Image (tube, rainbow, N blue to C red):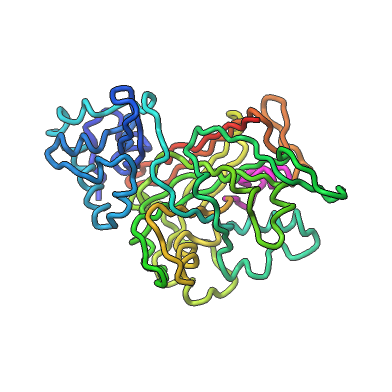
């Protein structure tokens, strides 16, 4: 099936053409302080609620100030709304009515697009987990005994999920280096990034009812980019025996555009071969493949330092969702779960500084002559990603950016 063409000049050659149509929430100078749902098309943002009224199809879902009502409506409605937006932006008869409702993306302010209910972070890259195992347990088996039997994860803090562009204040906490007799308190000395991919839950599930692999599409609305900032020294001292806490809960940045799951059909790939037989509830070999061919890029102060491939992730988002609910935990509209650090097999594809600098032993040399082991105040990190779309197009995710402040 050929992708329809938009009447908006330049949109068809953009990573944000009608094959994509990601959703966000914005404010603009014409109505300051009023948050509106926007749909990215080319280098413009369509005021979705106003567009629906202009074409005679008003929508309370698109008139909301957050995506949550649309998320809660479920897949049949998501499909219907996406089809309507495609029709409006490709039917020449709507050009006159909708053109005034397109705002340059550079002139709007983007906000957190949905209210985050719960946040879960996984640890799904075998390359990342193996590298950390080699760093912290040299001479031992890199992976823990459970790693290839279940998607390891932890529950994070929804209230500190922030939109791209929000400054990241260097967190304070307890730190204790191996040679220290007692812990000290102060700002983290090992502030790190984690390049991740996030999945946004729309339709909720009932408490006590697990979500099976084949129901992934029913519940997941779309995909975004995530930087799960990490204070490695605080984390190292606190995480035994209960896992990440203050070293991870101070800020999690997300991109402002939520790419619909339906825009990623051409990006779906079979995940890497598993060398351990999964338990039946995680066995995806006979079902739909939910590996995704996303190409990430991490830039530090404008310099590209890593290009992690998401297709190499051992555990898929469908398996993560299934494992997250197998005990009967319910899903809520606005739940966010993230993949964990995306790392590939090569040094230049590692998605965190702890890997790129091998825990600070091999400083990263930047093109401007400076070096880094971990982040310094003033550093800015930007993560972008693309995926293959239909008919040779590219699906863009925008970016997630954050600058470290003292």
Q: Is residue 97 left or right of residue 34?
A: left
Q: Quadrant of the C terminus?
A: top right
Q: Please tell me whether residue 248 is drawn above or below residue 319 in the rendered image.
A: above
| Residue in front for this viewpoint, 388 or 246 | 246
Q: Residue 369 location, x and y as percent?
A: 72, 25
Q: Please tell me whether residue 374 is drawn above or below residue 176 in the rendered image.
A: above
Q: Residue 8 location, x and y as percent?
A: 25, 30
The answer to whether any part of residue 270 appears in the image is yes
Q: Is residue 335 left or right of residue 6?
A: right
Instruction: Please give the name of the residue rendered at 39% of the width and 72% of the height, measured from the top-left corner.
Output: 209
| Residue in front for this viewpoint, 206 or 299 | 206
| Residue in front for this viewpoint, 251 or 190 | 251
Quadrant of the rendered structure where residue 47 is? Answer: top left
Instruction: Please give the name of the residue rendered at 71% of the width and 40% of the height, measured from the top-left corner.
Output: 188
Q: Residue 175 location, x and y as percent?
A: 76, 46
Q: Is residue 381 left or right of residue 8?
A: right
Q: Is residue 183 magenta?
A: no
Q: Is residue 343 magenta?
A: yes
Q: Is residue 358 left or right of residue 109?
A: right
The answer to whether any part of residue 312 appears in the image is no
Q: Residue furthest bottom?
A: 280
In the image, the segment drawn in magenta is 342-358
| Residue in front for this viewpoint, 221 or 325 | 325
Instruction: Please give the name of the residue rendered at 46% of the width and 61% of the height, measured from the top-left corner.
Output: 270
Q: Residue 403 location, x and y as percent?
A: 58, 31
Q: Please tell me whether residue 197 is drawn above or below residue 93 in the rendered image.
A: below
């Amino acid at each position: 099936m050929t992708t329809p063409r938009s009447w908006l000049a330049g949109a068809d050659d953009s990573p944000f053409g009608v094959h994509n149509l990601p959703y966000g929430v914005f404010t603009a100078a014409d109505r300051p302080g009023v948050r509106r749902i926007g749909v990215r098309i080319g280098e413009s943002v369509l005021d979705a609620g106003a567009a629906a009224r202009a074409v005679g199809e008003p929508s309370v879902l698109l008139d909301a100030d957050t995506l949550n009502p649309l998320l809660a409506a479920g897949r049949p409605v998501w499909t219907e709304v996406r089809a309507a937006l495609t029709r409006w932006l490709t039917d020449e008869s709507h050009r006159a009515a909708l053109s005034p409702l397109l705002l340059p993306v550079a002139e709007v302010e983007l906000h957190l697009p949905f209210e985050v209910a719960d946040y879960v972070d996984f640890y799904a890259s075998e390359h990342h987990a193996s590298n950390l195992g080699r760093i912290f347990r040299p001479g031992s088996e890199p992976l823990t005994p459970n790693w290839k039997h279940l998607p390891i994860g932890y529950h994070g803090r929804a209230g500190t999920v922030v939109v791209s562009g929000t400054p990241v204040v260097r967190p304070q906490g307890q730190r204790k280096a191996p040679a220290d007799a007692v812990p000290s308190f102060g700002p983290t000395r090992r502030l790190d990034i984690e390049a991740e991919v996030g999945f946004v839950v729309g339709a909720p599930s009932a408490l006590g009812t697990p979500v099976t692999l084949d129901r992934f599409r029913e519940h997941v609305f779309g995909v975004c980019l995530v930087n799960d900032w990490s204070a490695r020294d605080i984390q190292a001292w606190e995480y035994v025996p209960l896992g990440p806490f203050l070293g991870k809960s101070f800020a999690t940045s997300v991109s402002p555009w939520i790419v619909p799951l339906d825009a990623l059909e051409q990006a779906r790939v079979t995940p890497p071969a598993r060398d351990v037989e999964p338990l039946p509830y995680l066995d995806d070999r006979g079902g739909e493949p939910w590996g995704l061919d996303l190409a990430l890029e991490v830039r530090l102060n404008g310099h590209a330092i890593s290009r992690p491939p998401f297709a190499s992730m051992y555990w898929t988002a469908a398996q993560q969702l299934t494992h997250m609910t197998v005990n009967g935990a319910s899903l809520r509209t606005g739940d966010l779960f993230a993949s964990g650090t995306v790392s590939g097999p090569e040094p230049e594809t590692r998605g965190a500084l702890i890997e790129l600098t091998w825990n600070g032993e091999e400083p990263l040399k930047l093109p401007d002559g400076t070096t880094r082991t971990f982040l310094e105040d003033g550093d800015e990190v930007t993560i972008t990603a693309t995926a293959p779309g239909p008919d040779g197009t590219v699906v863009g995710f925008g970016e997630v950016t954050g600058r470290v402040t003292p």
